[in-house]
Amino acid sequence: MKSKWGIPRFMPLKTFINPPNGYLVDDNCVFGVEVFVEKSLGLGECLTLKASPKSVSHEWKISKFSTLVNDCYSEVFAAGSHEWKLHLCPRGDEHNKDKNMSMYLCLVDSGDQKVKATYTIQLKGKSGKTHQSTGMWLALLLAAENCSRLLGDECVMKADVKVLGTASKLP
């Protein structure tokens, strides 16, 4: 994508103009360049950062937790002009089947955009016990045998999401 390549400090000027070094002869010098053109794929992205990103909180109340077998999703919520949802795998995802409970923060539809966001996800049960994960992308795993005991039959999954920016493909 660059039209100019080079080395900004290739050689000190004193070395270049010193006649015994042979770079400058009779006030003349010769420069050469080899150019290799590779097929350009023309791929590029435009990164747009938010000036003052705001954190958005969303709570999802999950009833009858102990009876859940299949994956379930929260309602869609908006954060940073994007739509998100929480994904709960009560018996673990494909990598943790029947070993852990897995929870994810999912971007609903970003089109061709990549979204850079930070998040905090909490899982709170009746006992007041809270499990939390923070980062850029989420996969929070909890040991399956402890979940029902710690959470009870009702729990709340809470997400705090802050969209920092987006990257879109250039046309």
Image (tube, rainbow, N blue to C red):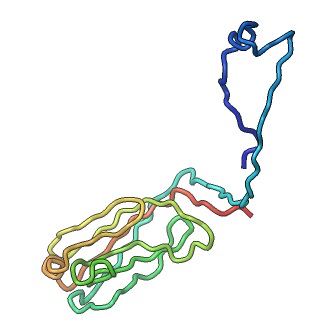
Residues 80 and 117: in front is 117
31 above or below 84? above
162 above or below 111? above
Q: Is residue 107 left or right of residue 33?
A: left
Who's the residue at 51% across and 77% down the image? 108
25 above or below 138? above
Who's the residue at 33% across and 75% down the image? 103
Q: Is residue 64 left or right of residue 38?
A: left
Q: Quadrant of the C terminus?
A: bottom right
Residues 25 and 92: in front is 25
Who's the residue at 78% across and 35% down the image? 33
Q: Position of residue 92 (x, y in %)?
A: 28, 81
Q: Quadrant of residue 86?
A: bottom left
Who's the residue at 60% across and 67% down the image? 113
Q: Position of residue 14 (x, y in %)?
A: 69, 9
Q: Quadrant of residue 146?
A: bottom left
Q: Position of residue 81 (x, y in %)?
A: 57, 67
45 above or below 66? above
Label count reads 0
Q: Is residue 82 left or right of residue 143?
A: right
Q: Quadrant of residue 114?
A: bottom right
